[in-house]
Image (tube, rainbow, N blue to C red):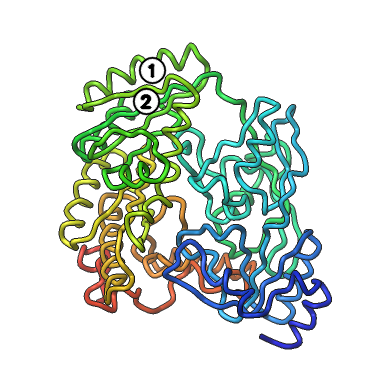
Amino acid sequence: MNRRFLKSLQKIYPADRLLTRDVELLPYESDALTAFSAKPGAVVLPVNEDEIIDTVRLCHALAVPFVARGSGTSLSGGSLPISDGLTIGLNRLNRIKNIDPEQRIAVVEPGVINLRITEAAQPYGLYYAPDPSSQSICTIGGNIAFNSGGAHCLKYGMTSNHVLGMKVVLADGTVTQFGSESVEGVGIGPDLVGFFVGSEGLFGIALEITVRLLPQPELYRTVLAAYDDLGRAGDAVSMVVASGLLPGAMEIMDRLAIKAAEASVKAGYPAAEALLIVELEGEALQVNAEFEQLRRIIDESGAFEVRVAESEEERMRIWKGRKGAFSAVGRLSPDYVVQDGVVPRSRLGEALVEISALKEKYQLDVANVFHAGDGNLHPLILYDGREAGALEKAEALAGEILALCINLGGSITGEHGIGMEKRDYLPAMFSEEEIDIMAALRLAIDPEEIANRGKMFPSGEAPALAQHGMHPLERAGVISRE
């Protein structure tokens, strides 16, 4: 790394918060997508926003690329270090600066853990709605970068629906304010908050975030339905949606995911090919009426067993199994690739049947865990990285799943983002002109491309899996090399 740059960093950070030795950099070489790794030139650990601003301005002055990192839970390589660049760790900016129960807002720093906001708001009868599966460890800064959702995004939306304002430092060191602390300010003028949320760190770093809080629901009714067929569980989701009900959450787990969750947290799930979790929440009178309608739909959907949580303890046990499923799959396989495609809810059953067929084609196990309510698939493709060609085979299957999602009218990502993993699939979703417009917007804010360089936009190279034969998206007729 540039010696002049390092000397300048030493003026901002004491030795214990400026990491340069190999052993110190090792934990930062990868995020949750461990198939990718890169060694940063240095890692800094700021403790206040002034240090972040000074660091970004220094990076801009000396053209050193940087990536902001929270807990490193990105599943798309979005927080992967830039080789020989700078990683700015934000975990120490973890203060909840204000809870205003009257305005129903919280003002937080980017390193605050998602779940801590709800814990701080609970004494006021409030909570923060977005709930990614990693909410006990993921940070608000990372949630903003990828517009995270979670199990309850069906009813309450994504992170972008709950961020009212942000103080940010752009890639050139400019400090500015997007949005405000007022709900009334939403919808006035350009939606700069919406522009920033989901930008995967390409514009800069959020220094302070104002989020919307919601009243805690008066009543929850949580139903667990077991099916002997995965497609039938998917069809049940379509039946619930078609009925006009709007549950707080609808989640599906398949046989392998159930097995992993049981081994990990012992949630007490029945043995089944698929489980559907549906949760109603809100005012007691409304929830009880909707519950009767939901029970009729579930009974008609072909479930062979239906359980209703009779206590908060039972409800939390059901959710503990679902939210722990990703990490629990590590008990079944030394390695896995997780995908994040989206299909229309009306075609969910069709998508699950196709994924089962692809699993047989590639002779790989796939554990399905996903947000069924909005068609966001999370198939976990199991493989053993010690076997030659195993990763490439798993990636090929992942590519075919992306092709399936596009052909069914969906998307290549729901909440994990593009990052490194899916950047070369962007042309399958967008035209060359559309990608050029996105790139122009990025360059208008960051002409030197120092903020999270190399992420999201196509690299110009074929994806790794395409090097082993015809690209799966090409086979599916989604892209052409002519």
- Across and down, in percent, residue 272 comes to 24, 37
Which quarter of the picture shows residue 463? bottom left
Quick one: label 1, few (<14), some, or many (20+) residues within 10 Å?
A: many
Q: Would residue 354 appear left or right of 311 to someone viewing this image?
A: left
- At 69% from the left and 87% from the top, the residue drawn is 2
Q: How far apart are the alpha carbons under marks 1 and 2?
A: 9 Å
Which quarter of the picture shows residue 58? bottom right
Report whether residue 215 is seen: yes
Q: Which of marks 1 and 2 is in front?
A: 2
Q: Which part of the image, by quadrant, shows the N terminus?
A: bottom right
User: In the depicted view, which residue is nearer to us: 36 or 257?
Assistant: 257
User: In the depicted view, which residue is nearer to us: 15 or 356?
Assistant: 15
- Across and down, in percent, residue 285 comes to 48, 11
Residue labelled with disc 1: 291
User: In the depicted view, which residue is nearer to us: 221 or 27?
Assistant: 27
Give SS at disc 2: strand
Report whether residue 447 is seen: no
Mark 1–mark 2 CB contact (< 8 Å): yes
Quick one: label 2, few (<14), some, or many (20+) residues within 10 Å?
A: many
- At 47% from the left and 69% from the top, the residue drawn is 457
Residue labelled with disc 2: 223
- Across and down, in percent, residue 179 comes to 69, 46
User: In the depicted view, which residue is nearer to us: 439 or 327?
Assistant: 327
- At 61% from the left and 76% from the top, the residue drawn is 23
